[in-house]
Image (cartoon, rainbow, N blue to C red):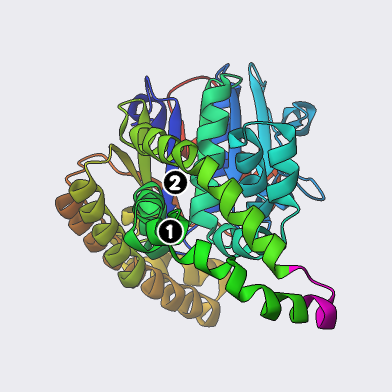
């Protein structure tokens, strides 16, 4: 089965799974294949190792989409009928851009972005890559500039934070503590009230920081942005649940990543999020189990010598153990995830770090969907 079949009619594809299973590579290869089929595709990564830029042959990516030149893949036999774009998420800048869009005017935007309390708070909030990623994804989806969007997410336990990011933001904004702080007669008014003037005046003289003014501006401007935050959070949550969105679970056959995949699938069910396909990377071919070690040694010995033949057969036996493990693991994943047609990418000899490796992975993901894939 080709992944193109699973993603038919989907605009947003979110790749999730345990760390170290090839999620970033899968995201890039998926975007490559979709672009080769004729779509305008943007792939977004929040991977701090910046492997996506390296695999695309670029020194770095920024917070805005950058087009990947199609010539980069022509030498690998891929004719790019569409366009491939990529970006590396900058969480702090994404949060600042969101505030700028929600601010009622330019003066309000300058006040809040330049506010010292906001700068500390926004750095903490933006430190949640999941929150920033979901907001950036929504922004790109709303822009209408791309036919398809592919998102590479953090490891799966953190990806649950990604799923819940809009809800957590709404709960925070509607929480009792914040309402008390922002109420006209609440804690904020008492903090910035006349009785505190002496303390803040002393702090201003000692530190040069007008904390009273910073607090006053922060609470005044934040209060004006709350409704915009609520609306954006609700819209993002709706996008994640929309039928045009697809979650792709990426794993390997090893025990721990497989458990993570099963756990994440359970969370998707509970959250009523759309699951599209399972990709199992680094699979040892089950055909290895059909080879008899004794027969292989007998055939190899006359050609390479008995000693080398024995070493080769010992290596074969090790791979057969892995192939058996992979077969059993995939059978369990099929049952637990209710996914009868997983997409299996074989174990490659080298790590995927360039265009050639991406094309190899895309070939396995899109096999049969078009010539060259």
What residue lies at 14% left-to-right and 52% top-to-bottom?
335
Place of residue 44 in the rendered image (x, y in percent of width and height, measured from the top left): 59, 42
- Residue 15's disc is 2
The residue positioned 68% from the left and 80% from the top of the image is 199
Tell me if residue 121 is in the magenta stretch: no
Viewer-nearest of discs 1 and 2 = 1
- Is residue 244 left or right of 127 when viewed as pictured? left
Residue 122 in view (yes/no) = yes
Towards the viewer: 225 or 219: 219
State which region is magenta: 204-210
**Relative side of 144 to 19, left or right:** right
For the residues labelled 1 and 2, the Cα–Cα distance comes to 46 Å
- Mark 2 crowd level (few <14, some 14–19, many ≥20, 10 Å Cα): many
Quadrant of the rendered image containing residue 340 = top left
Q: Which mark is residue 185?
A: 1
Q: Nearer the viewer, residue 100 or 18?
A: 100
* Residue at disc 1, secondary structure: loop
Label disc, if present, on residue 193 of the rendered structure: none
Asked whether the viewer can see residue 78, the reply is no
Within the magenta stretch, is there residue 205? yes
């Amino acid at each position: 089965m080709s992944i193109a079949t699973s993603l038919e009619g989907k605009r947003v594809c979110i790749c999730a799974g345990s760390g170290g299973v090839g999620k970033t590579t899968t995201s890039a290869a998926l975007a490559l294949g979709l672009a080769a089929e004729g779509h305008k595709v943007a792939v977004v990564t929040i991977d701090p190792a910046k492997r996506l830029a390296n695999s695309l042959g670029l020194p770095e990516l920024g917070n805005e989409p950058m087009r990947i030149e199609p010539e980069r893949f022509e030498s690998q036999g891929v004719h790019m009928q569409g366009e491939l774009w990529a970006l590396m998420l900058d969480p702090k800048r994404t949060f600042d851009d969101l505030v700028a869009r929600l601010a009622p005017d330019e003066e309000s935007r300058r006040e809040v972005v330049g506010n010292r309390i906001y700068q500390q708070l926004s750095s903490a909030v933006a430190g949640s890559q999941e929150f920033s990623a979901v907001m950036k994804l929504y922004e790109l989806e709303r822009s209408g500039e791309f036919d398809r969007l592919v998102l590479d997410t953090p490891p799966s336990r953190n990806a649950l934070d990604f799923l819940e990011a809009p809800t957590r933001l709404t709960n925070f904004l509607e929480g009792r503590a914040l309402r008390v702080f922002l109420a006209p007669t609440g804690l904020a008014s008492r903090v910035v009230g006349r009785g505190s003037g002496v303390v803040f005046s002393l702090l201003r003289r000692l530190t040069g920081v007008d904390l009273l003014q910073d607090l006053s501006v922060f609470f005044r401007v934040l209060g004006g942005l709350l409704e915009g935050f609520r609306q954006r959070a609700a819209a993002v949550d709706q996008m994640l649940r929309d039928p045009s969105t697809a979650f792709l679970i990426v794993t390997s056959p090893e025990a721990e990543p497989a458990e993570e995949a099963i756990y994440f699938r359970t969370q998707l069910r509970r959250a009523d999020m759309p699951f599209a396909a399972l990709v199992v990377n680094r699979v040892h071919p089950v055909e290895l189990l059909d080879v008899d070690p004794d027969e292989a040694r007998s055939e190899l010995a006359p050609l390479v010598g008995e000693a080398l033949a024995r070493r080769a057969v010992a290596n074969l036996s090790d791979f057969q153990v892995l192939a058996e493990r992979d077969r059993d693991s995939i059978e369990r994943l099929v049952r637990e995830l209710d996914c009868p047609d997983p997409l299996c990418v074989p174990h490659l000899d080298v790590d995927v770090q360039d265009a050639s490796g991406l094309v190899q992975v895309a070939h396995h993901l899109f096999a049969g969907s078009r010539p060259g894939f």
